[in-house]
Every structure is written in C-alpha cells, then in structure tokens.
Amino acid sequence: MPETTARHHRWDDMPKEVVTEMISRRLITCNRMMIAHVYLKKGTIVPRHSHENEQITYILEGALKFWIGNEGETEVMVRAGEVLTIPSNVPHRAEAMEDTLDVDIFDPPRQDWLDKSDDYLKTGKDDLLRSK
C-alpha cells in the first residue's frame, strides 16, 4: 500500500545495520525512492555489480574509487562534496580509499537491500559472475 503520510527521520536516531565488519548502513525508503547512509572502512571493496535502480552517490566524508563499465574501463575518484550518478544496469565496483560516509539514493528502492539478499556485499564476490 502506498505511503500517504509524511515522515520525519533523524540519522543519528536510527540503528546502523552491520552488513559486514567493513560496511554498515542506515536506510530510509518511501514508495519510489531510497536514501542510505553507507559507512565504509578504509580498504573496503564493493564488488562489481549492477542493478535496475538508478543511483546517485554523494560522498559526505572520505573518498571512493569507482570502476565503471563491463570491464571497469572507466575509473572515477569521488571525494567529499562530490557526486557520481550511475544509470540503471551499469556495472560498477568501488574501493574506500579512506573511512567514508556515502549517501546513496536509489530509484526504485533496492529490494535486495531491504530483504537482505545483497550477497555480493556479504561474500565480497562480483554479482555479475553468477549470471554468466
């Protein structure tokens, strides 16, 4: 059932979900969008993956190095105060170059994050390898 009531959230009042020893997050969802605070320790690898969701990544603290494309052919360093947009179904991976607080916005919400089936984060293995 679609939400019809405005809700107010405070990041600091929300519990952090520990995804791995290197990654934790806080999620806020509504009908058609999701915003997340993602906390990555220096050296964290986010394995190559893709998803139907459009993604906006805004780095508040730290830096993430991204490899974009089927072979990771485009490298982009995203630092505090910078934003990266990732279109639907574009493969990407990332590495935290320092402790990082990343704001990710998705449309539609990431169902795999909501139902905890985001195994690529937990296993550290590229999700694209499973589909081949």
Image (cartoon, helix red, strand yellow):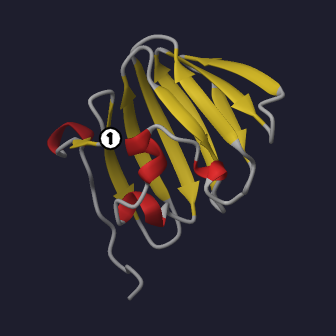
Which image quarter is the C terminus in? Answer: bottom right
Q: Quadrant of residue 43?
A: top left
> As drawn, is 26 to the left or to the right of 126?
left
Query: Is residue 95 placed above or below 26 in the rendered structure?
Result: above
Residue found at x 22% / y 41%:
16
Query: Is residue 30 placed above or below 88 in the rendered structure?
Result: below
x and y percentages locating residue 34 in the rendered image: 46, 57
**Viewer-proximal residue, 13 or 64?**
64
Q: Quadrant of residue 37?
A: top left
Residue found at x 73% / y 56%:
89
Look at label 1 and name its amino acid.
Answer: Arg
Q: Quadrant of residue 42?
A: top left
**Viewer-proximal residue, 85 or 131?**
131
Q: Which residue is mark 1?
A: 25
The secondary element bearing badge 1 is classed as strand
x and y percentages locating residue 124 in the rendered image: 46, 37
| Farthest-out residue, right | 73
Residue found at x 53% / y 69%:
32
